[in-house]
Amino acid sequence: MRLSILALVLSLFLSPAPFVSADSRSSHRSTGLLKTQKTSPQQEVFVNYSAYLPMIQRALEGFFVSPNGSDTNDGSLTKPWRTIGKAASLVTAGDVVYIKEGVYKEFVKIRASGTELEPIKFLPYPGDHPVIHGINKDPGGNVALLEIYGDYIYISGLEVRNSALMGVYIYGNHDIVDKMYVHHCRENGIMINHRK
C-alpha cells in the first residue's frame, strides 16, 4: 500500500527533464537521476527527472487605484480608489500605491513625505500601464500634471502626457522618478527643483 501511494506521488511530481533546485541563498542547476529498471544484472537504466514544487505568490500589500474605483472606497485591491490624488492625500511613510491600467485625467499633488528607510512608492500594478492625461487643459493653480513636494517619494512606470504646462515637477528632497514616459507637454517634461 505504501509503495503504491509513493508511486502515485512520484508520478505527479516527477517527469523526464533536467532537475532544477533553488534555495534562498542561490539558484543552481543539477541533474537528478531516477533508477527505473535493470535490463541485466550488470546494467541499470537511469532517466533524468524534474521535481515540480507549487509556487505561492505573495499578495501585494498596499493601496490600489483603478479607473473603476471610487474615492469613497478604502483603497484595497477589491475596493480601490478612483483617483491617484486621493491616494496621494492619504499616504504616509512606507506606503505603496499600485495604480491599475487606465487613463487618469487629473492633476496630482504629492505633499506627504516618506523616510530614508520607508519611502512612499507609487507604482503601476504589475503588468499594467497607467497614464496621467492632461487633455491639454489649463492647470489653474497647478504647474504640472504630477507635482511632488514631499521627500523620499519613489515613482516608477507611469506615462504622463498632454500637459498644458509641465508634465512632472519635483520639488522635494531625495525623490526618485524612474522609468517614466513623459511627452507632449507644452513646457518641461520633467523639472527638478528642490527646497533646502
Image (cartoon, helix red, strand yellow):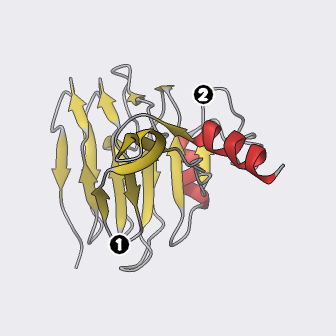
The quadrant holding residue 68 is top right
The quadrant holding residue 182 is top left
Q: Position of residue 136 (x, y in %)?
A: 33, 21
Q: Which residue is mark 1?
A: 25
**Sequence-first tag of 1 and 2:** 1
Quadrant of the rendering where the C terminus is positioned = bottom left
Between 147 and 182, the one lying in front of the other is 182
Q: Which residue is mark 2?
A: 67
Residue, far front:
41
Between 196 and 13, the one lying in front of the other is 13
Residue occupying image coordinates x 24% and y 73%: 195
Check disc 1 and give the amino acid type. Answer: Arg
State whether residue 67 is above or below residue 65: above
How far apart are the alpha carbons under marks 1 and 2?
40 Å
Local SS, label 1: loop
Q: Position of residue 60 (x, y in %)?
A: 58, 52
Left or right: 29, with 20 as reference point: left
Residue occupying image coordinates x 35% and y 72%: 25
Residue occupying image coordinates x 44% and y 71%: 113
Circle 1: is it few (<14), some (14-19), or many (20+) Cα within 10 Å? few
Residue occupying image coordinates x 64% and y 37%: 12
